[in-house]
Amino acid sequence: MTEKLPHLNIIDSRFLELDALRGLAAIMVVLFHFTINSNGVLLGWEFNYGVTGVDIFFMISGFVIFLTISRVKRWPDFVVSRFARLYPAFWCCMFLTAVVTMYFEPELVSVKRILANLTMASIFFGQENMDQSYWTLLVELVFYFWILVLLILGKIKSIVNVGLAFMVLVVLFHAFSAYYTSFHEFATRKIELLNHFPLFFSGILFYLVRNGNHVRRNSLLILASLLAACFMHYQGGRVQYHVTPSEHYVILAVFHIVFAFAIFGKMGFLNKAPLLFLGKISYCLYLIHQYIGLRLLAMLTDSWQINIYPALVITIAVVVLIAYLVNTFVEIPANMIIRNWYKHRNQKRSHANPSEIAV
């Protein structure tokens, strides 16, 4: 059995503000990838700030992880829940990307690379991600593993103390990196959660504050987590190559303020159909947009000589459509099939053994 945190009834179904923030983060990342480098030259501008959209994703992941925890009774339930949520859509988008890559750059596609990418942890198998956006998936996966360890050990109620200790250790690990530069570079490249943990921790703390758990203490810890996230700017994170430290500090502060308003229902003006739609398909959009989108954009501007602005609109429309189709016909159905299979499996086991606890 897992130790559960108090349930947060207000987000039993969907927290619309967070869905809207997901949609906003997704379009930020898409615009970032579509407006930098050669496309930025054609446009005459770059949306560098879009790279920080991943910061929002990480904060939301920290917040909503307890929604998953509150619905599980044992740690295997958590594993199945995360698998059903992440892998079917990922596999579909990864194979689509592999097909497109095989058409444009067949030398980059191999059985080894595809098999390694199936795990979401291709870097541990000496292979590149099929799409460069996939780096954040391993960050999320390591975070979920950290949560899983707490569930197995029955320490989920101590997550604030454990998380604070881990964050302090991470800050110290970076602060004294001059004494072990090679190991620091290796560790931050292989386990990028070390560069982003404060953002996940902020999300966790925001959940607890919204739920009324030690509000003053956890609010102060959110401030500490924000400061730690700012400190991380130069410690291996990828944002450092696109925005200045001062810009990132301001953006992180704004994200935390917006998050605080959102979880208390003060950002209702964001709950518009376009953002909510993008929030719904945000995972698939993130998975599918970069390689396929950039290839399409290059084809439109280079081969077909279409102006960059209509080409950009067409490309965004296409990747949004693909993401919608994957969400509708793969992500949602596969999630339900796996969850229902697991539920029925546990029900059969509980009937066979009354002492077995079913989901």
Image: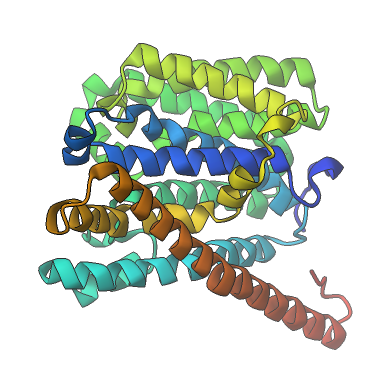
Q: Is residue 230 visible?
A: yes
The residue lying furthest to the right in this view is 354
> In the image, residue 225 lies at what x, y percent?
55, 21
The quarter of the picture where residue 192 lies is top left
Query: Is 325 on the left or on the right of 305, as rendered?
Result: right
> In the image, residue 271 lies at what x, y percent?
69, 39
Is the residue 161 above or below the residue 280 in the image?
above
> In the image, residue 175 lies at what x, y percent?
34, 18
Query: Is 13 on the left or on the right of 21, as rendered?
Result: right
> In the image, residue 7 lies at what x, y percent?
83, 44
Is the residue 138 above or below the residue 339 in the image?
above
Query: Is 64 on the left or on the right of 28, as rendered?
Result: right
| Screen quadrant of the N terminus | bottom right
Residue, x 28% and y 38% (percent of image)?
35
Residue, x 55% and y 27% (percent of image)?
165
Q: Is residue 62 visible?
A: no
| Screen quadrant of the C terminus | bottom right
Is the residue 190 above or below the residue 285 in the image?
above
Type of colouring: rainbow
Q: Nearer the viewer, residue 218 or 325?
A: 325
Q: Nearer the viewer, residue 246 or 354?
A: 246
Residue, x 67% and y 29% (percent of image)?
205
The residue lying furthest to the left in this view is 107
Residue, x 50% and y 39% (percent of image)?
25
Q: Nearer the viewer, residue 312 or 113?
A: 312
